[in-house]
Image (tube, helix red, strand yellow):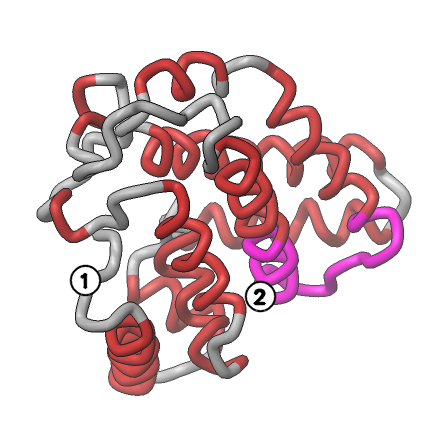
Amino acid sequence: MGDPSFTAQLQNWLDLLRAGDTQARDRLIEHTCERLRRLTRKMLGGFPRVHRWEETDDVFTEAVSKLHRSLESVCPASPRQFYGLAATQIRRVLIDMARHYQGPQGLASNQETGSLGGAAKEGGDGGSGDRREEPGSLLEWTEFHGLVESLPEEEREVFNLLWYEGLPQAEAARVLGLSPRTLTRRWQDARLRIFRARRGEHLPD
């Protein structure tokens, strides 16, 4: 996904979409849902029963529906605009999921709310980094996504590409038209802002 050739393909799909090609919209939605699945496993990996139930088509049907409606009303002209739209939809679906499963009546009640390190055991992302730095409950995940939503636009845009879309920094810099140094500074500023807002708790890796 971080390959520059993918960004070129993304631009091609956007051009086709503006020309009325509905199959291009399907390709764009498939890309977004793939990333949503990965982040869902990251967020729900510490709640095994919820994680299994969340693998049903219900959540992804809702995500597809939201993105489909967005692409019907807005036609992004560039990968930069599309990534912003897609990341917003991903984040809001994750917030809705976390809110749905938290609380005494939620499906995650009475389950362990410690580290999300169980993600790897339950088929999670398997990414590197200290899993102990991730939010430890669905309530904390809700807070985390909300804090990202409240970031200043320049920082949120960088956070969208690096965390929600999973782009390497070099590719994110190309998409945004920034120097690597500027992108790194905005990424660090965003992480620090969220770190402070979470009262010294680390960001998800």
Instruction: Name the foreground residue: 76 vs 130.
Output: 130
**Where residue 178 sits in the image (x, y, percent)?**
41, 82
Disc 2: CA contacts within 10 A as few (<14), some (14-19) or many (>=20): some
Q: Which residue is mark 1?
A: 202
Whether the magenta-drawn stretch holds residue 75 is answered as yes
Q: Magenta part mainly helix, strand or loop?
A: helix
**Where residue 90 sits in the image (x, y, percent)?**
56, 46
Figure quadrant of residue 26: top right
Label drawn at residue 89: none
Q: Amino acid at mark 1?
A: His
Which circle, 2 or 1, is nearer the viewer? 1
Q: Earlier in the sequence, mark 2 or mark 1?
A: 2
Count every numbered label the image shows and give the total: 2
Instruction: Please name the residue shown 39% across and 26% down the image.
Output: 109
Instruction: Please name the residue shown 49% across and 20% down the image.
Output: 54
Q: Is any part of residue 180 visible from this angle?
A: no
Instruction: Please name the residue shown 24% across and 60% down the image.
Output: 203
Question: If the image is split into quadrants, where does the N terminus sit?
Answer: top left
Q: Amino acid at mark 2?
A: Arg
Q: Which residues are magenta?
A: 70-88
Whether the magenta-drawn stretch holds residue 27 is answered as no
Q: Are marks 2 and 1 in contact (CB under 8 Å)?
A: no
**Where residue 114 sits in the image (x, y, percent)?**
19, 37
Instruction: Please name the residue shown 61% across and 51% down the image.
Output: 86
**Mark 2 secondary-structure assignment:** helix
* CA distance for labels 2 and 1: 27 Å
Q: Which residue is mark 2?
A: 80
Q: Is any part of residue 199 visible from this angle?
A: yes
Instruction: Name the foreground residue: 117 vs 185.
Output: 117
21 is higher (above) or lower (below) than 141: above
**Where residue 16 sits in the image (x, y, percent)?**
78, 46
